[in-house]
Amino acid sequence: MASAVRRAPIAPAPAVGVNFLDLGMYSGGSFIPNGDYVVFHNVILHQPQDKQGNKKGPERLGVMVDFYPMANPIEENKLQQFYSMGTKAHESYQPNPDTGKGIVAIPGTSGGLNDKTNWFLYIHSLVQSSFPPSLGTNDLTVIDGTWVHISNEDEPADRSSFQSATAEVSQEPRKPNKVAIVTEILEGGAPWEGGGGLEGAAEAHAALNGAAPTPVTPVRTMPRPAARVTPALATRPAPAVARPAARPVAAPAPAPVEPAEIEEVDEAVVNAATDAVYNLLLKSPNGIPRAALRTQTFTEVKKLTKDEAMATQVINTYFEPGGEANLSNLLSSLNHSLVGMTVKPIA
């Protein structure tokens, strides 16, 4: 019998040391990996929690940003990060109670917003990436659905003097933190120009990177009307028409008007409004404030029709006083309804 051949043990590859003594190796808790995302924003009062769910640290005003990876933008893949407006911001401002997309001043207080905060760094990076700041004076809806490239960058050097509120850390050298900021608004990803949103994000991402798109499970679906039928709707300034009983709304329906007062909305206006609102609702899967929908509808109709007069007519028909029933019927046909001051999908 042949004797077994004894093989010399293979020496393991030498371990590569990590320079963990370099303070720049530490990210400061930022967990949004560099990459391409569809972003949505909500202003909140936030109090951090530890791993056991216990509250820790003071409550802060800021913006919770939802990051949907463009390669597969489904709810299960969503990441979130809170961007604080500063330790004192909540003493002068609160989230807008009607929209959650802005802030309102607390009566009897005075104060400003600090330009050294994480939120300032984020929104400043968006402006530096070509977002026109004049479009978003008091409502974040205008940037919801933006396609962005995120990078974790070192915080500015002039923030190095900031210290943690905990005594234990305050006695140690402060490490330079990383902040996840926008370094590029991707092609076709600007909602204020009619782009962005969850729909089509995966395909756009694949095209930008020269790869095949990942099959995507939609976050939600929204039926589009199969046919265009011009409904008998009240036009401005006629009183609002009662919404059909088959699809009740939260608020009581207004009293019906006399048939003689009802006029049909021009079919071109109905079609322009439906196309525009449909496109906008697709970009806001979690709902959109009515005020923001009004503003964006004007822009979208003008973009689609190249006709500013048509955009004005749509706004007058659906968003001015007397157009409540028109808007209600339009939203109903798109499986949405007005809840308070926000347009939301019907569950």
Image (cartoon, rainbow, N blue to C red):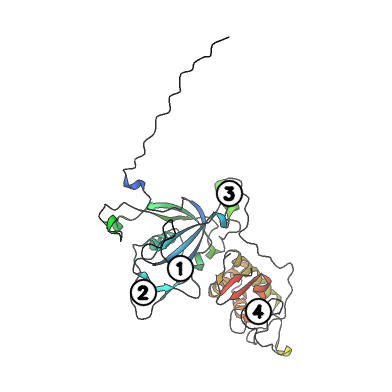
Rounded to the nearest angstrom, the CA distance separating label 2 from label 4 is 39 Å
**Residue at left 46%, top 65%?**
132
Residue type marked 2: Ser
Q: Farthest top residue?
A: 1
Q: Earlier in the sequence, mark 1 or mark 2?
A: 1
- The residue labelled by disc 3 is 206
Relative to 241, is 84 on the left or the right?
A: left
Q: Which of label 1 and label 4 is nearer to you?
A: 1
- The residue that mark 4 highlights is 326
Q: CA distance from mark 1 to mark 3?
A: 31 Å
Q: Are marks 3 and 2 in contact (CB under 8 Å)?
A: no
Q: Are the two marked residues, 1 and 4, in contact with CB atoms closer than 8 angstroms?
A: no
Q: Nearer the viewer, residue 162 or 71?
A: 162
How many C-alpha atoms fall within 10 Å of the one at disc 2: few (<14), some, or many (≥20)? some
Q: Evaluate if marks 2 and 4 touch, with contact meaning CB atoms under 8 Å apart.
A: no
Q: Quadrant of residue 114?
A: bottom left
Q: Amino acid at mark 1?
A: Val
Q: Amino acid at mark 3?
A: Ala
